[in-house]
Image: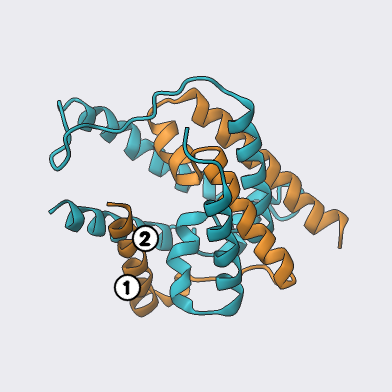
Amino acid sequence: MAPFFILGLLAGGLTLAIFHPDAFGEIPSHPFGVLSLAGFLVGFGARTANGCTSGHGVCGLSRRSVRSLAATGTFILTGIATVYLVNHVLV
Amino acid sequence: MKHVSALVCGWLFALGLGMAGMTRPSKIVGFLDVAGSWDPTLLFVMAGAVGVGSLLFPWVLKRHQPVLEDRFQIPEKRAIDGRLLVGAALFGVGWGLSGYCPGPALVSLISFKVPIWTFGLGMFIGLGLGPKSD
């Protein structure tokens, strides 16, 4: 199941690239070390929390899951704190 | 048949993510930048998705079993534990740094640009090294 879902995501990316290329933006221009760290945190964090923006934020909240509400509130807060540091403190 | 179903669901999900702007990191970072030029439009994406989900989940779960599987796999855990909060906190830091969460990142790999693949490689390593689902 999961491999086919992921294949579908990639096919969707191809469809967007052909018919709606403006859908894609650039990742912030951090050094590659920071980009890999960001990817690692997203992957490791989603695995640890058993869910991501889709799993907790969309599916979990749709099912009125309190766990998902706690997870969603937490990652939005640390996301806001991170962007605040990057955009307003470390510049 | 269930493989076709999973493929089509992934495809549809990708189109939704792309059309809603989730594959543009500037939009995510703009949403999280409450002290700067805050872009609240992601709230509408979330509200739209959760709105549709809230209507469809109860409707689907009224069935005794899925059309193509023996049983539904709905998370049963209720406890808000340290693992959930620490994982979500780390996830949020990576999300804020990059503007990508896993779905949009996978969709964006199609652009074959080095920065997104750098992020993607880190993400796969993190997914691989993270603790198994509990």
Depth order, front residue of B31/A36: A36
Q: Mark 1 lies on which chain?
A: A
Image coords of residue B31 (percent x, y): 62, 51
Query: What is the letter of the orange chain?
Result: A
Q: In this view, does B125 lie to the left or right of A6?
A: right
Depth order, front residue of A17/A1: A1
Q: Chain B is drawn in which colour?
A: cyan
Q: Is residue A28 left or right of residue A22?
A: right
Residue B8, compared with residue B34, is above or below; it is below
Answer with the quarter of the image where residue B57 lies: top left
Depth order, front residue of B97/B130: B130
Badge number at residue B127: none
Mark 1 = which residue? A15
The amino acid marked with disc number 2 is: Ala
For the point 16% across and 31% down, which residue is it? Answer: B65
Image coords of residue B17 (percent x, y): 42, 58
Instruction: Count residues near mark 1 (Cα–Cα under 10 Å), then give few for <14, some for 14-19, many for 20+.
Output: some
For the point 53% across and 44% down, which residue is it? Answer: A47
CA distance separating discs 1 and 2: 9 Å
> Can residue B14 be spotted in the picture?
yes
Mark 2 = which residue? B14
Residue B63, compared with residue B119, is above or below; it is above
Q: In this view, does A70 lie to the left or right of A30?
A: left
Q: Mark 2 lies on which chain?
A: B
Looking at the image, do the residues carrying marks 1 and 2 touch, with CB atoms under 8 Å apart? yes
> Can residue A26 be spotted in the picture?
no
Image coords of residue A45 (percent x, y): 60, 45
Image quadrant in which the N terminus of chain B is located: bottom left
Residue A59, compared with residue B20, is above or below; it is above
For the point 49% across and 58% down, which residue is it? Answer: B22
Residue B117, compared with residue B41, is above or below; it is below
